[in-house]
Image (spheres, helix red, strand yellow):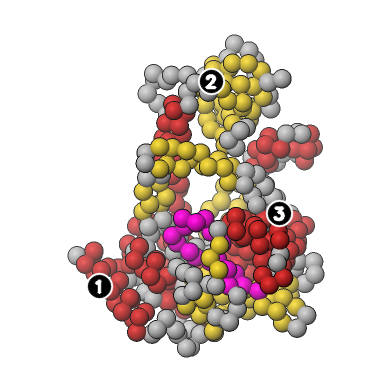
Amino acid sequence: MCSKIIDNEVKNIISRFKQTSNVNTSVKDLTHLNTYSIDDSQTFEIDDAISLEKISYQHKLWIHIASPTSYFEYQSAIDKKARELISTVYLSNNTYYMLPEILINDVFSLCEREKRQSLSLGVIFNDDGSVSSTEIVQSIIKVDFRLNYTEADELIDYAPKEEEDLSIISEILQSRKRWRKNSGAMEILESFGKIIVEDNNPTLKIIDPTLSRQLISEAMILYGSLISNFTKVNKIPVPYRVQQRIDKVSNDNIQESDNNVLHNFVLKKTMGKSYYSVTPMPHSSLGLTSYLHATSPIRRYADLLVNYQLNRYLNNKELISKEDIEQMTLKINNQGRQNIMRYREDQKYWLIKWFKTYSFKEYNVLLLNWINKHKCICILYFIEYHFSTICNLKSKKSLNIGESFNVQNIVNNNNNDIIYFELISLSK
């Protein structure tokens, strides 16, 4: 029955979308701006896009976020189904989408050369990266350029005169990042390896923190920061993203390490766990007094709740109650942890298969930490592939944290998910 109700809601949304010719005349038309989306080539859920508006001698940065809640209501069948998942779950061989796939593709995503409804934030900055003024509007946008990260990096690097917007936006957001770092933000720029599975064959893809990835990251942080200020000032109940500082590791200990990987590992240990709360509190590692997730409403339910509330507030409609938001925040925290564990277990499963494929190979590793030295359980960082994992390490030598050496994968007959290695030689 629920599936049939969802199908009817989907058909109704598509019908209404087509009848309006993709245009809502009651919202701000920003289709005249050159608008860019930057994602991996295979990305299906396109939540965000950016534009640059030139106003006399100033630049106004626009961040556009998809607005799915312009099309369906809180407590609808689509909404209730989304709550069951809480987020899109990305597994190596399958993806479980939070919202109906046909709506993601045909109505919600900010597709190239298609008019789409958006919640847009316009920002003018001071020279030091602080915010001079903001504007939050319901809008109609049209993505002119759908770029992958490689294409975006080329535009930023070369900054051709006819297409210099991305290069200017990158400079503006680098200035904003410096402002956050002066406010206590911690930046960890590092490559990381991720398992990709094609035709049941696991491969390892290395993702580098290029300028375009930094640009998108900083733009999304900016949106979450300024929207959290807006909801806080206007007393709009939303789930805030909170991270408190817990472990204190002296800066001397961090700076003594000349190994960037170990430095970053130690730095991460100073950060508390992140969680959602209806009470706005600081996000320590971002250097912000309050923050929320709002930039992925197609794939995260916390962002969808913010999307609901902003649309309701801007249309002078009744807000979802604080009690409802509080109840949903508990579910988001609980189900969110389960989704993360599901993703990590899937990555670990395919990582084990990847190691079995290359069991003959020697790996140069760095010892990041001993979890249980007596049981030989440790965290190893695989230098060539930019990832770390919990391992069982067989060695006749005493090994110290920060030491680099070569290991080989060995057969595990214990039928558990710990990967076994033995020391081959110390690094020269």
- Residue under numbered circle 2: 408
Q: Are marks 3 and 1 in contact (CB under 8 Å)?
A: no
Q: CA distance from mark 3 to mark 1?
A: 47 Å
Extreme residue toward the left, this view: 1
SS for callout 3:
loop
Q: Is residue 268 above or below residue 51?
A: above
Q: Are marks 3 and 2 in contact (CB under 8 Å)?
A: no
- Amino acid carrying label 3: it is Ala
- Amino acid carrying label 2: it is Gln
- Residue under numbered circle 1: 8
Residue sitting at x 66%, y 66%: 166
Instruction: Work out whether residue 331 can be spotted.
Output: no
- Residue under numbered circle 3: 185
Q: Is residue 378 above or below residue 321?
A: above
Of the numbered discs 2 and 1, the one sitting upstream in the chain is 1
Whole-percent x and y of residue 373?
Answer: 58, 20
- Amino acid carrying label 1: it is Asn
Q: Crowdedness of circle 2 by 10 Å Cα count: few (<14), some, many (20+)?
A: many
The answer to whether residue 394 is magenta is no
Residue in front for this viewpoint, 136 or 333: 136
Q: Is residue 176 left or right of residue 295?
A: right
Q: Which residues are magenta?
A: 35-52
Q: Quadrant of residue 425?
A: top right
Q: Crowdedness of circle 1 by 10 Å Cα count: few (<14), some, many (20+)?
A: few
Check the picture and name the quadrant holding the C terminus.
top right
Instruction: Work out whether residue 62 can be spotted.
Output: yes
Q: Is residue 179 left or right of residue 208?
A: right
Extreme residue toward the top, this view: 396
Q: Crowdedness of circle 3 by 10 Å Cα count: few (<14), some, many (20+)?
A: some
